[in-house]
Amino acid sequence: MKKFAALLLTLCMVLSLVACGGGEKKEEAPKAEDPKTEEPATEEITYDGVFKLGAVGPLTGASAETGVAGKQGQELAVAEWNAKGGLEIDGKHYKIELIYEDSAGAPETAVAAAEKLLGIDKVDAIFAETFLSSCIIACMELAPKYPDVLFSTIEGVSTVIPEKILAEPEKYANFFKPCWNSDTYGGLVADSVFALAAEGAIPAENKTVAFVVEDTDNGRSNADAAAALMEAEGWTVVAYEANPQGATDFYSQINKLMQLDPDVVVTNFVPQASGVAWVKQVAELGAEWSDVAIVYPTKPNFYEDSGNACADLFWVPVEYDPTSEAVKEFEGKMQDMFGVSLTKCQTSGYATTNLMFEAIEKAGTWKATEGLIEAYEEIVYEDPILGTFKFEENHTVKGGTGGLNMATAQIQPDAQTYKIVYPDYSKQADAYPQY
Amino acid sequence: MTLQKRKTSYGFRVSVVFIAILAILPLFLKNDPYWLHIGILCMMYSCYATCWNMVAGFTGIFSLGFQALSGIGGYVSSLVAMHMGISPWLSMFIGAFFAMVVGAVFSVPCLKLRLMPYIAISGMCLGEVVRVIVANLTDLTRGEMGLWGMPNFTDIGPISFAGGNRFSYWYLVLIFLIVYLTVVAKIVGSPLGRALGTIRDSQDAAVALGVNVPQTKVKVYMISAFMMGLIGAFYAHYMQILTPTSVIGPQMMTNIVAMTLFGGLGTITGPILGAFIITILTETLRFLGDYRLIVYGLIIILTIIFMRKGLWGTAKPKVLAWVKKMEEKKAAPAAK
């Protein structure tokens, strides 16, 4: 009887999980007859072949939010290209088939997934892994074994990746990272603080800074790069706090920092909940410092959930203008196709996939050894949302002037809007002190 | 033939057949790096689960921070190989030695605790403390940015390990598995093994029988720690990347516990069976997308409900009874 009850409870749990998973249906590609989409019926297009694109991303685990968003962007790009006839090479049309596998955020699983795509599914090009630097570094070792296949990521900020490429350029000739490195992030943070301090928007009498970041490659590498640059300019790092990803209790850290009284606190969290918790707890405890937020104000409901607590906050990097027509159009597509709000990772997934398809058409081949590597090295891809993708010698893309959009903004007193305050060429308003 | 001898003889024969299959398999998978990699992961996780099973299954020490020891082995071996130019063949033993030392430092005070929850919590603390230290020693370990640049195992004559040669790594991890199986089988069959079983069943009874409980616990913990360190070093030189989250994070421990419980805690075969089935299952269920995690969870829950001793723990008596029946059938005509 007990076993029967246990079985019954297990089945109930599974059914409820399946029911919860019903939300995934939103992610299904739109059908041809869906009036909301402009995609023509795929039956009308005659293809001459299939181009298989593989992708390995963190679809489960702590970074699933990021991985799923990237996947949505990629699926949208594939749907749009297929709708206009797929890849066109030498007058022939190839349907794009996207095969996605989960890395679960573990390097060994990422390698297994990539091996499956390369060895069993025989993909023609691959995104491996899409976001997580540790998984990307593990997957990089597959690139020399499949020289015909072009390897790309969506993001991945660790400087290890370009270091490896520069150290052994022939070995990793077919590996590209269409994203800047953490030193670029750190550079923007440091440069913004210097400029805003010079303007008086960031009072910096003691030149002291504290870092509160999540304990991930992203959090630490950004903070380390910014800290090194600021120390070189005579700033002192008075605290460096690394929290588990998803942490929401910062009371003890805020109290500690209030004792240290830094001029600037740089925070870096990917989950929105951490960012919301941070700004609310800082406001609640009445801490008075200049807060520079990395990443989390980009999250769709950040303003709504933070209330007035996020007013006057500085944040980096502003990678796109949410009021622009291109962003509004993209957000509309995301709503139609998946029923979700816009996130940065969707735009990255979309842009880097489009970049790959443009490069393939330009090269006239998807074989890395037959010209695609050269096409990647030469391409200058203008994305209407994120800016210019142009690969440097280390096979990564630079941020800032002539590269991907990067700016620093300040959330306005209404806690609903923001204005770009740095750099000068894209400035929308003068910055003002938070306190 | 006594029951014990029959068990040993049967277990030995099965092990030989199993290892022979694993030894031949790469010849058929030579051009399939995916399945070679999955096979390597299966054997690697078998080693992890075997180590934890020796502590938890045979001794009753439910230490939940055991993955920290493999992480120490991996990091120390990599750093020694990278900065001192020592061959990974040697550095992996240095890594394992460090893991054993940390295991000793942990086990001497903590294993005096008798109740399972306290041991479990102290073990979790070990895992977290090691993870935080490794994550914060960024100048040395690069923390979450990832330690890379550790060399592959150096070639042995014509056997090349360059570029993560799956074929060579398959046989290397197979040797690890054979050694681990032999060590565990020897320990379980020895007076030490009987002392471990007594400690697991009743520490008071073990004391009454003259077993030095703390010393025996520390001894088995150190042996397991050394073995964990060794396989952690293998992971490092095979995967070529270490981050605190991926090798010392709780997910690794969850996998090890799930594999051991699924296969059969306190049996030699169980953890290996569990490691193979769960690793292959998670791969073959990929076609289900996100739903595979539900199926995976369901299988584990059902196993725990209906086979509380795990797959092999439940099947073992039936298999042995069948073997006995077969042997009696064979012996019957001879007696006539």
Image (spheres, coloured by chain):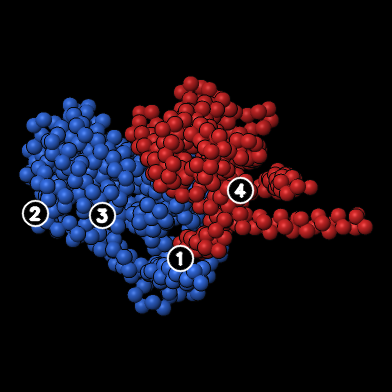
Chain colours: A blue, B red
Q: Secondary structure at mark 2?
A: loop
Residue at x 16%, y 38% (from the top left corner): A257
Q: What residue does disc 3 label?
A: A273
**Tag of residue A82:** 1
Residue at x 19%, y 59% (from the top left corner): A305
Distance from disc 1 to disc 4, alpha carbons, whole Å, reads 54 Å
Above-or-below relation of A242 to B284: above
Tell me the kind of residue under disc 4.
Thr
Q: What residue does disc 2 label?
A: A413
Q: Secondary structure at mark 3?
A: helix
Above-or-below relation of B263 to B176: below
Q: What residue does disc 4 label?
A: B267
Mark 1 or mark 2, whichever is nearer to me: 2
On the rendered structure, is B105 left or right of A235? Answer: right
Marks 1/3 in contact by CB < 8 Å: the verdict is no
Tell me the kind of residue under disc 3.
Ala
Above-or-below relation of A251 to B103: below
Evaluate whether residue B52 shows in this view.
Answer: no
Are callouts 3 and 4 both on one chain?
A: no
Q: Nearer the viewer, residue B245 or B287?
A: B245
Q: Earlier in the sequence, mark 1 or mark 3?
A: 1
Q: Residue B216: percent from the left, percent from the top?
A: 53, 34
Q: Nearer the viewer, residue B133 or B3?
A: B3
Distance from disc 1 to disc 3, alpha carbons, whole Å, reads 37 Å
On the rendered structure, is B310 left or right of A282? Answer: right
Evaluate whether residue A340 shows in this view.
Answer: yes
Are callouts 2 and 3 both on one chain?
A: yes
- Label 4 Cα neighbours within 10 Å, binned few <14 / some 14-19 / many ≥20: many
- Label 3 Cα neighbours within 10 Å, binned few <14 / some 14-19 / many ≥20: some
Residue at x 57%, y 60% (from the top left corner): B307
